[in-house]
Image: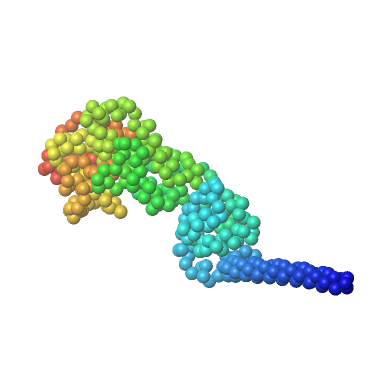
Amino acid sequence: MREPDDKKSFLNFALEKLRESLSGLKEEISFKYVASVAGAVFFCILVIGAVLIFADPSVAQIQNPVQTESETTSQVETEKKVTVKIREGLSTAEIADRLAEKDVIDSTLKFRLLARFRGYDDKLRPGAYTFNLGMTYDEVFAKLLTGEKKLVQFTVPEGFGVKEIAERLYNLDLVDKEEFLQAAENFSPYDYMKKRKNVFFASEGFLFPDTYTVENDVEIEEILDLMAENFDQKLTKEMRSQAAKMNLSIYDLITLASLVEREVRFAEDRPIVAQVFFKRLKLNMPLQTDATLQYLMNTPKEDLTIADTEIDSPYNTYQHLGLPPGPIANPGIASIEAVLHPAETDYLYFVADRNGHNHYANTYEEHLNLVNKYR
């Protein structure tokens, strides 16, 4: 009777071993399969990355930087400069996006793969960078690895408008011109700067002309804040009190001062021109100042025409009574003081000669004689 039990036990033992063997084989097959698939995927990624990277001419030139025909097709394009500001803490992907937005690189993926394969991810430094369009990836990385941060000094002369300030800052690689103009359009940190109807730039008139020193990675808002704060400090309590005594708001004070600034070349003429404007406003006469027409033009003219005086704009002080909608430039202290302390004269007219000296008249007939004589 024991023989069958022994055979049954042996059979069960054999079946158990077989199941264990099959189970191990299954696990081995499953592991090998997963490993094979993972290896294939990783290989494909490497191949795609290599194709994307080494298909880029800028990478191919790392060891042998020879210019290709495509890189020399447009000298004008390669000489065009753009400024890109990289802030502390930006990821490689965010840096790539900023560079692509400015057309410095043509592929964020290529940039990220290059940074990853070369170990640059944690080595790209913050700063304000100036790139020429058409630079190779190698040249772009060279800048980002060394960092570009320095002090830049700029001077805004009295009488500069927002557009002229934007141009100067752009030429110093501090700002993108269009971005600066866009920011200046509604920039008004102080109540007296609140943008009025038909005004182009809320900040016009309130960016104090002075010499400033900033880091080259300064933001546009920081520049505007710096200049507006300087204006607010320069406009003393005494000045504000005097303006109030004259029933002048700060806005109207600076609007008038900007007209004086743009109409006058010599210091002795400032209070006289200010008085002419006050008398015309009192008599309800149009100011007829050429400076407001020049403000509307992309390129100022030495002599305006009759057609220019017919331009349809609220800034045309030949066609509209009173002050223009807002300041037309950023005046200095001397022009502001001239408005606060105008000369005592009866003049209603003035004309500048070719050297910039003003000549004044009480009547229109006298004025025409001066125009014929000096213009």
Colour logic: rainbow
Q: Where residue 61 appears, x then y in whole percent?
A: 61, 66
Classify residue 67 as left or right of residue 347.
right
- Quadrant of image for the N terminus: bottom right
Image quadrant in which you'd find residue 224: top left
Foreground residue, 337 or 15? Answer: 15
Classify residue 290 as left or right of residue 112.
left
Q: Where residue 255 appears, x then y in whole percent?
A: 26, 39
Foreground residue, 119 or 286? Answer: 119
Image quadrant in which you'd find residue 23: bottom right
Where 142 sits versus 276, above or below?
below
Classify residue 131 as left or right of residue 183.
right
Query: Which residue is pictured at 47% across the width and 40% down the height?
Result: 213
Query: Which residue is pictured at 53% across the width and 44% down the height?
Result: 150
The tally of labels here is: 0
Where 269 sits versus 41, above or below?
above
Query: Which residue is pictured at 52% across the width and 63% down the height?
Result: 107
Where 231 sits versus 46, above or below?
above
The answer to whether residue 160 is seen in the rendering is: no
Query: Which residue is pictured at 30% across the width and 36% down the height?
Result: 192
The answer to whether residue 91 is seen in the rendering is: yes
Q: Residue furthest right?
A: 2
Where 105 sits versus 224, above or below?
below
Image quadrant in which you'd find residue 8: bottom right
Foreground residue, 346 or 298? Answer: 298
Q: Where residue 248 appears, x then y in whole percent?
A: 23, 32
Q: Where residue 40 appears, x then y in whole percent?
A: 65, 70
